[in-house]
Image (spheres, rainbow, N blue to C red):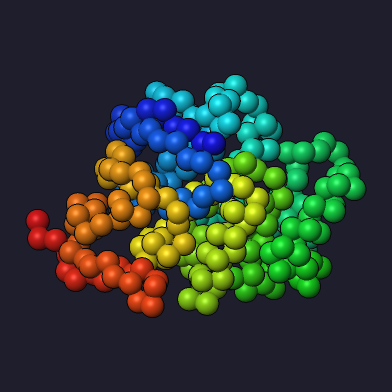
Amino acid sequence: MLVLDRISFSFKGAEVLREIGFALQPGRLVALLGINGAGKSTLLRTINGLLPPQQGTVLIDDIPLTRLSGREVARRVGYLPQKSNGTAVCTVFDAVLLGRKPHFSGSPAARDLKLVEQTLHTMGLERLALRDTSRLSGGELQRVMIARALVQEPRVLLLDEPINHLDIKNQLATMSLLKRLTTELNLVTVVVLHDLSAALRFADRFVLLQDGRLYACGDRRVMNETAMREVFGMEALIREVEGIPVVLPLAPCTP
């Protein structure tokens, strides 16, 4: 379980997050939503321990994050930022193996290598294991970065806009894969998304931020037309097309 207890964070005197609190159960994919500047990326980095909150506590399986070393946090939390610095030219296998570093010192053990092989298979990347990362498509590279996070064997998986630069086919494939792995591995998966229809289609829970505050946390019922207006600043309808929910923007709200 992931619990945030009244998390607040300020940067250069400006309040970015204010008393954010919610609890998330494993086995659920959670969409973290809000307009640009709402605090979504900052909240992910706070959960990951990269930005210690000025107030409040992050707990993973009832353990406060402040009691864990950086290595211990990395064993529990997998994190994929918007822009990854970990794409230096190397083979796909070695790029994913880097995710095992919190679990070994010196050389990787046989179990580390085996887990990389299994994760490559799970992600459909085994045929690319020896290919240089510089020769991958955008969708392939994104799967490599997700595999690197998964091979950490995290309890919590944080992904900041993982489908933002992918074509529609790869967006659907990536979100379907994340949904399946969240269930199979019993993860708490938190995904920042801007595509509200994708969020409705794949997420089990929704966390809505507004100006650094928690607007709502809950199931699909919190994603209503009032939230579209108050959080996202637009008039919109939410309808189903052959059983798939979609958001139909109508117009921006007038000031």
Q: Position of residue 150 (x, y in %)?
A: 67, 51
Farthest-out residue, left: 255
Please tell me which residue lies in front, 131 or 229.
229
Total number of numbered discs in the rendering: 0
Answer left or right for 201 relative to 15. right
Please tell me which residue lies in front, 166 or 120.
120
Q: Position of residue 37 (x, y in %)?
A: 32, 48
State the image quarter where residue 12 is shown.
top left
Give me the residue at 35% from left, 76% from top: 241
Answer left or right for 41 relative to 34. right
Give me the residue at 53% from left, 56% from top: 83
Q: Position of residue 63 (x, y in %)?
A: 58, 25
Give me the residue at 10% from left, 60% from top: 254
Q: Position of residue 25 (x, y in %)?
A: 51, 41
Quarter of the figure that contains the N terminus: top right
Give me the residue at 9% from left, 56% from top: 255
Answer left or right for 39 relative to 133. left
Is residue 105 in view? yes
Answer left or right for 87 relative to 60. right
